[in-house]
Amino acid sequence: MAQCDQCGRHEDLPYQCRRCGQTFCAEHRLPENHDCPGLNEWDDPDGVFDSGFDDSVVTDDDDGGVFDSLTATGGVAAYFRGNVAYLVLGLMWVTFALEWATIVLSGIGILPSGSFEFLFVIQSDHLLRAWTWVTSVFAHSPVSFFHIVGNSIVIYFFGPLVEKYVGSKKFAALFIASGVIAGLGHMGAHLVLVQMRMASGSVGALGASGAAFAILGVLTVLNPSLKIYLYFLLPVPIWLFTGAFALLSVVFFVDSSVAQAAGQGNVAHFAHLAGLAVGLAYGAYVSGQRNVPDQLTFGGGGRGPGGPGGPGGRF
């Protein structure tokens, strides 16, 4: 028995929208009855009735043929519609492989020393390396496999729910924006602490935990009673799940000695909080558009979306 993505009603004979791929009951099966993201294409005959084949033929009079063939319905980009969460996961693991390739090539002298930090780590003393604002979101600690695995679990289980709710483009924007804000927020918090003489030196950070916390924040606002079955056995409402990790992040950020004692001293805890704040704000902004499921099985690790610490602070 399927569940309507709009009203949550259980249906023996559900309808699947060919425009957005979601499942609906008879009442909400029409695109106009479930705020289908594909509605904005109905006024464009090419987006509804044309396969895109003709657009792929570039002529002298067609300046945008290639671009249109990639982005229109039936184009290459259509394969990622509804699957951006999984695309993000793939990019994370590709980046992880590139990190190790960079480390190996630096070790044998093909790449200069410091290439890893130059390419993948956002650093408080090198904030003008703007590319690291984004690459650090997809990069993870090469010395702790759990770092990328922990974030992958959260994004795999929760990401598609948020993407289905807000749409693929907005999910991609949320993921990147929250990750960037989390990284810059952590850098800013450290610089403030340095000015207050409560910290010294420079810090670096990498990881998708800020974006993962943003995803959790969105779901916490949309459906706080959403049940997560930890290890497929223990039912926990998502507000408690998210709140517990947020509280730990606050405690660890405020008292570094407690974080060190818990083995979390090298984690960018403020990045977690910044990402969560973005998710909560965005969840409040989009709430009420459609329903989300009431429960979810989640068998991830028990140390949180960000995992343990990393070089200069993983998040």
Image (tube, rainbow, N blue to C red):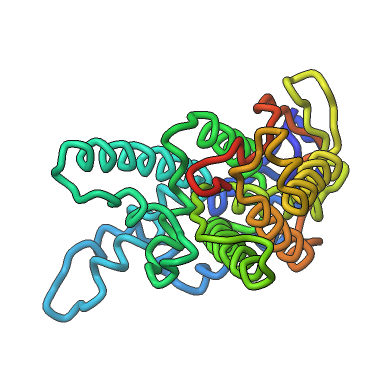
Please determine whether, in this image, residue 81 is positioned above or below residue 284. above
Residue 184 falls left or right of residue 44: right
Q: Position of residue 229 (x, y in %)?
A: 78, 26
Q: Position of residue 215 (x, y in %)?
A: 66, 50
Residue 121 falls left or right of residue 305: left
Please determine whether, in this image, residue 17 is positioned above or below residue 131. above
Most extreme residue toward the bottom is 61
Residue at 30% x, 42% y is 98
Q: Position of residue 67 (x, y in %)?
A: 29, 67
Q: Is residue 231 visible?
A: yes
Using the image as rendered, state which of residue 13 and residue 248 is in the foreground. Answer: 248
Residue at 59% x, 43% y is 266
Q: Is residue 9 visible?
A: no
Q: Position of residue 306 (x, y in %)?
A: 61, 41
Residue at 82% x, 47% y is 247
- Specify the quadrant that holds the N terminus: top right
Residue 112 falls left or right of residue 126: left
Please determine whether, in this image, residue 76 is positioned above or below residue 147. below
Residue at 68% x, 62% y is 198
The count of marks equals 0
Using the image as rendered, state which of residue 223 and residue 81 is in the foreground. Answer: 223
